Amino acid sequence: MSVLKYSLIRLGAFFIVFAACLMLDLGEYTIFFALIVGLIVSWALGYLFFNRLRLEAGQELARRFGGGRRLGSSELDDNAAEDALAEDFHLTQEQLRAQQQRGAEDHGPQTESPR
């Protein structure tokens, strides 16, 4: 239902702006101008003022068309390997940070010697 609401709001905004721009009479470029301005304004209105409805519509579409996909064994293995690499990287970075802090504490405050 969110998809329908969001689509109708965007289409309504587009047609209102499109009709308003058609009244400007820019010669042969009137329709082109009205089309571009209508698309930009309807996108901006949907993005800025109907963000919650846009996100709900996206989630609804994801559930309907892509949410039930099962991963194969090779994809599961790849995901597990990537997770392990990310965890190892994170642990290594924490260890390096801890060593740097200990090194700074052991040496005390650094002062420059006079020349």
Image (cartoon, helix red, strand yellow):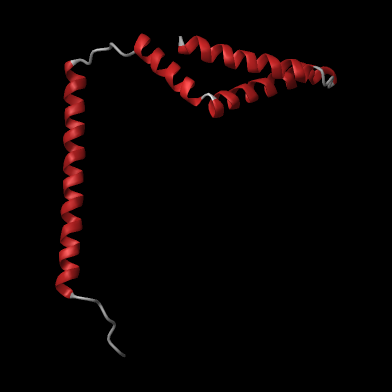
Q: Quadrant of the C terminus?
A: bottom left
Judge left or right: residue 99 versus residue 20.
left
The residue shown at (17%, 49%) is: 92
Q: Position of residue 79 (x, y in %)?
A: 21, 27
The residue shown at (79%, 19%) is: 30
The residue shown at (46%, 24%) is: 52
Q: Position of residue 84 (x, y in %)?
A: 16, 35
Q: Is residue 60 above or below residue 101?
A: above
Q: Position of residue 71 (x, y in %)?
A: 22, 16
Judge left or right: residue 48 versus residue 97.
right
Q: Nearer the viewer, residue 33 or 14?
A: 14
Judge left or right: residue 67 versus residue 56.
left
Q: Is residue 113 above or below residue 36?
A: below
Q: Is residue 91 above or below residue 79?
A: below
Q: Nearer the viewer, residue 14 or 113?
A: 14
Q: Quadrant of residue 108?
A: bottom left
Q: Position of residue 90 (x, y in %)?
A: 20, 45
Q: Name the residue at the bottom extreme.
A: 115
Q: Quadrant of residue 105?
A: bottom left
Count of labels shown? 0
Q: Is residue 100 above or below residue 7?
A: below
